[in-house]
Image: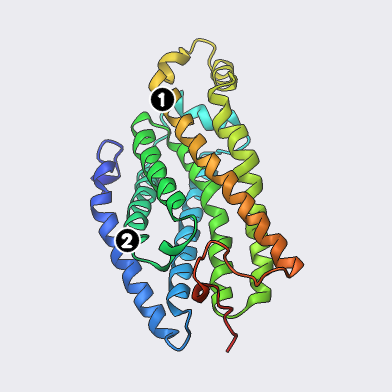
């Protein structure tokens, strides 16, 4: 296992992590479904609570990596510093290949879970494909801290979403409304405003090159960020950004509906009447 945490061997990690994650998820959801077997929402509780714990663990690891390497979303120098000197550490391999494994596993599960009936199911399929491609493409180019920052800005808001959905399915509707608002803020501000400003557009508007030259006037920026990397990564991230914007509109509609009482609180992406049934607190 120690050798698998080396940069050159890390791509073998998913061979172990994907089946381990799938087994863990299956076992966890079976246990939680059994515990809440008297609730109609037992399966949804098991799904959302697992996602909540999953994103919480990923967020903690990502936060640890970013703090250890003094990397910040708003600091371009910290995001690109790894291009001037190797910042790779074993935790990078474990985290990034862990993220890759989680999304591969989730991609497989999504065709069998209750969420396959969501109105944005195709968007989720596209999101997973793009995310898997970005991780697999960015890792060989040694975008370690940058990739962690991109994942971190997306994962931490999902902790609030899945926690909100879990307590909603448990019957605590009022509490879930406030946690949903926390999710809305943590989703829209970082993903719609911070994400493009500091993690996408610097590729195109010259800020990335200017930052690299500021850190090292003798640097060959074209050799540091090859043309393929400059085109593929920001283009793929832009696809994620478009999805973020579409989901932000849905989130705002949900929030408005929640407080104007025009509809029952719940996930508007769920199509069936059964999935919209308001859970009762027992």
Q: Is residue 85 visible?
A: no
Q: In the image, residue 126 lies at what x, y percent?
A: 42, 46
Q: Is residue 14 visible?
A: yes
Question: To which quarter of the image does residue 133 belong?
Answer: top left
User: In which quadrant of the rendered image does the C terminus lie?
Assistant: bottom right
What is the distance, in whole Å, between disc 1 and disc 2 at their CAs?
A: 30 Å
In front here: 215 or 35?
35
Location of residue 137 in the rendering, given as x and y in whole percent from the top left corner: 35, 34
Q: Mark 1 — residue?
A: 229
Question: Which residue is disc 2 drawn over?
Answer: 21
Farthest residue, direction top: 218
- Residue at screen point 44% across, 31% down: 233
**Mark 1 nearby-residue class (10 Å; few <14, some 14–19, many ≥20):** some
N-terminal-most mark, 1 or 2: 2
Q: Secondary structure at mark 2?
A: helix
Q: Residues within 10 Å of mark 2 (few under 14, many from 20)?
A: some
Q: Quadrant of residue 258?
A: bottom right
- The image shows residue 238, relative to residue 14, as above or below, that is above
Q: Secondary structure at mark 1?
A: helix
Q: Please, which colouring scheme is shown?
A: rainbow
Residue at the (60%, 69%) spot, across then down: 266
């Amino acid at each position: 296992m120690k050798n698998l945490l080396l940069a050159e061997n890390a791509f073998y990690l998913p061979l172990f992590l994907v089946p381990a994650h799938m087994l863990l998820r299956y076992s966890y959801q079976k246990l939680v479904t059994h515990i809440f077997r008297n609730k109609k929402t037992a399966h949804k509780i098991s799904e959302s609570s697992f996602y909540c714990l999953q994103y919480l663990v990923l967020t903690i690891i990502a936060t640890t990596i970013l703090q250890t390497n003094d990397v910040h979303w708003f600091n371009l120098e910290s995001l690109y510093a790894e291009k001037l000197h190797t910042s790779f550490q074993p935790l990078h391999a474990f985290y990034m290949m862990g993220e890759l494994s989680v999304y591969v596993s989730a991609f497989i599960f999504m065709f069998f879970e209750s969420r396959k009936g969501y109105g944005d199911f195709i968007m989720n399929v596209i999101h997973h494909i793009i995310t898997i491609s970005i991780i697999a493409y960015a890792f060989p180019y040694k975008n370690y801290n940058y990739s962690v920052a991109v994942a971190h800005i997306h994962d931490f808001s999902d902790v609030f979403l899945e926690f909100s959905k879990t307590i909603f399915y448990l019957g605590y509707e009022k509490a879930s409304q406030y946690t949903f608002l926390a999710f809305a803020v943590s989703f829209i501000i970082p993903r719609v405003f911070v994400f493009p400003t500091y993690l996408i557009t610097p590729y195109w508007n010259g800020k990335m090159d200017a930052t690299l030259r500021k850190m090292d006037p003798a640097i060959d920026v074209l050799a540091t960020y090859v043309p393929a990397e400059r085109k593929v990564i920001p283009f793929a991230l832009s696809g994620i950004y478009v999805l973020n914007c579409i989901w932000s509109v849905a989130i705002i509609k949900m929030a408005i509906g929640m407080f104007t009482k025009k509809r029952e609180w719940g996930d508007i992406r769920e199509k069936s009447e059964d999935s919209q049934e308001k859970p009762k607190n027992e």
